[in-house]
Amino acid sequence: MEFEHKVGGLVDDEDIAPEKEKRNWGGTLIALVVICCIVAAIIVAIILASPDGDVDTHKMKLDFDNIVAEQFKIQVFNGSWLSDHEIVYVDQNGSIVIFDAAKNTSSSMLVKTYDKTLHTMASFKLSADRQSILFVTDMRHDFGAPISARYAIFNISSQTVEFLEDLIKINFPLIKSPHVQYAAWGPVSNSIVFIESNDIYYIPEYSHASSGQSKILRLTKTGALHGSIINGLPDSLYRANIFNQVNEATLWWSADGRYLAYMSFDDSLVDLNPIEYYDSYMQESNNNPKIHHERYPLAGAINPRVSVQVVDLINSVNSGEIDTNIISPPQELAKQLQSDPRLGYYITYVGWLNDQSNGLNQLLVMWVNRAQTSSVLSLCDNSDKGGIFGPRIVNWKCETLSTFSQRIPPSTDAKRTILTAFNSNGTRLVFFALPRPDSVIGDHYHVAMLRGEERASKYLTHGEFDIDRLISYDARTDTLYFEVTVSENAERHLYKISSIGQSSSRQIKCLTCELEETCGYNYVHISPGARYLIHECLGPSVPTTRMRLLDDGLSMNSTSAEYQTSLKSLTILNNNENLENLVKNKQMPVEKFIAIKTNAQVPCDVYMKLYLPTEIEEEKDKKFPLLIESSEIDKRNVWKKFEIDWGKYLASRKQLVYARVDCLRTRPKLGAGGSGASSGGGGSRWAGASDSPGGGEHDDQLLDSPLFNAKDQVDMIKFIVENTDLFPYIDRRRIAIWGPTSTSAYVALATTIHDDSKLIQCTIAVSPITNWRYMSSYAAEHYLGLPWQESNSLKYERTNLLKRSYAFSMRKLLIVHGTADEQVHVQHSMQFIKSLTEHHIIGGVLHQMQLYPDVGHSLEMVKRHYYLTLDGFVDRCFYQKPIAIKATEWKGKNRPKNEYQ
């Protein structure tokens, strides 16, 4: 996608000025012919010099509606595996079908295209007996209440729909308006578990609501819609930081459907955070704003008490009494909590080990201490060996399987860092994605394995790449599948390790690096038996979804040539044809990837993804503005992934250069607890953490923040503007930086503060973090440590942006925030604006504040206005002459009185 400069300068106008006194018509004609030839040659040269060779300047540029319109939305895989060769998914026509990979055909259609009742479907799930489909519809998040939805149960044979709330009303007449927060099928038959008003309910066998035959068991009775105890769903702290998936529950079924493990959160000791709600402006009454008090632990405050409990569903149904057992935490963590209520613990993983050879159900739980410096993996089981109708369980006993001197990152379906399995000999295997220290190449996340009764894990991989997601283990072939982030080319690929149990013959191989089509960003779903996979190629071209054969029976004992067939494409499930046609008819900006190794000018390995306006090839000497998108802390920002976003729109329509930049250090990361933990697929080297958290020569600079090195960010910008050979099209007088959300907004503000050369003229911060003491305990303490410890106090002080607002003198600044933001409270922005207006600079900061009343963190409700606001600010930043304002410093007794105190 790169291009070369092949066109020279144009002929100067003075060289072809007409002669006034005498006209040489013959010469003029010849000159015109020559000029036409030159112009034609230039046009051809421009076309040849285009990066992809096919840039059509007559096509329409991206317009504003393209970035907010649904027709430019990418369709990703929306189904799930039913067996080792069958999936259920929504096809390109909108029908729900079962596809059989073994027969390479759709075997049955379950729901016809766009049933009106299900038009607002958010997701769906087929029951284990394949008789019904559970649809999630009409998701809503009312102020002061948890997320809820309507759950429709679709009977496939009768093609009729019933709603779960009607069934609840029949069994529980006192519940007039059910507030269903979650519902899902069990792993066997047609059982259902659902959560209503923070309590868990169980339906052993679903039948039509009209018959009233569906028995419902209430498994918990401690929850309440506005109470402080939440069962089966994450509270605000866990929802934002650990299990950060929308509408996901914290409950887990055993494979045989007998046991249900769930987490319970007691927030009764957690501090309350007030959030104002202004309600509809259409109301005639003059009511005061409502105030919702959300349980939200700040840095250093008391955390929620969390527990894991296990219900024996079979015993509960048979006896009529709920058979529940609480999983005990490791003794050392329990003692810490008893000694100091602030020293609680986190639970970052819960999962079942189902040994089919003996019918034993075991539970794995990962516990992390409050300081996030150590982790304990517990293995819990019971004395029941009698199968599904065994005796009543008396107790679950836990043993410490392994301890780690670091935080094990949370494991979710989207980013699985822990994977459990049994090999063909029945030996228990636990795989982890853990930072592997290396003083030469830096820390990278690699595969570690805990086998059988071993207490220490062993690394299986090593190198300059990061394990992003553990996917599947195939016991037949002793093979582990996982996805890898390759830093040097901004790609993500599927890898495998074969012969896990034999270290001498163990091999690692990339499976998606040499496919028939180029794919730089891969995401896969492997079948339960590891014979097939659903392959999502998400970039750099328009995404496609294919069914592929993973195991052809030859892969373990075959020649290299035979092995190439093991990922052959069986069929295309979705090619995003409509999106492809829309893209073809638009003049898209040029994408360019640049990698720069550490040198005298830049103290880190730099990776850039640039969106360049097509005018760069047409106007060689023209300089274009530069807008840099800052990355989130510990997350990558540069991928070879297809996107239609605001950056592409700006490069196409506004004729500016849009840059995403990552900075990777080769030194190890030593965050607050030395964990090196990351959550964004970038590894622990991403800029980053410093070798000396919280230290530095100057107290007023963020030189050595444990969050990132601000000086690195500024050095990168200096390198871009000063390296005219590599970036001849950048206008150094027009540079801006923006952070789209929370930590990236913090990075944007802090980088601007450290930019003493005033290279950055404008800054945009969306829902910014400005003082880490206002952030949640989990997020702040991960980077800065426990604030009540004296050694960490200075870290919080030096990463506080509120006392450094003077650095925005003579710069333009836009801050955007929703007043109902539950993740980064509007307090961050309010205090920063207060600092801007009263700190010792008067009239020197051209700041704009855009508040969205009653809008949460995502800003999805005001998406159109939000982008219009950004659009207008960019215009004023780059295309409007600066306003001359004299900055006045107030010192000593001349400083105005602080009227807010």
Image (cartoon, rainbow, N blue to C red):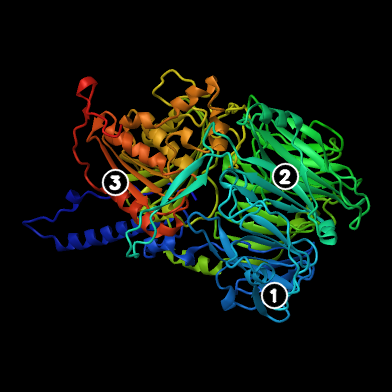
Which of the labelled discs sits on residue 209, or is there none? 1
For badge 2, the amino acid type reads Val
- Near mark 3 (Cα within 10 A), the count class, few <14, some 14-19 or many ≥20, is many
Q: Residue furthest front?
A: 174
- Tell me how far mark 3 sits from mark 1, CA to CA: 62 Å
Q: Please give left or right for residue 131 compared with residue 139 in the image.
A: right
Badge 2 vs badge 3, beta-carbon distance below 8 Å = no
- Tell me how far mark 2 sits from mark 1, CA to CA: 32 Å
Count of numbered circles on the image: 3
- Near mark 1 (Cα within 10 A), the count class, few <14, some 14-19 or many ≥20, is some
- Expressed as whole percent of the image width and height from the top left, the position of residue 163 reads 63, 72
Which of the labelled discs sits on residue 792, or is there none? none
Mark 3, mark 1: which one is toward the viewer?
1
Residue visible at 60% across and 71% down in the picture: 92
- Expressed as whole percent of the image width and height from the top left, the position of residue 309 reads 74, 47
Residue visible at 75% across and 71% down in the picture: 214
Residue visible at 60% across and 56% down in the picture: 247
* Residue highlighted by disc 3: 878
For badge 3, the amino acid type reads Phe
Q: Residue furthest bottom?
A: 158
Question: In front: 724, or 483?
Answer: 483
Residue 148 higher or lower than 758, as above or below: below
Which of the labelled discs sits on residue 308, or is there none? 2
For badge 1, the amino acid type reads Ala
> What secondary structure is found at the residue carrying circle 3?
helix
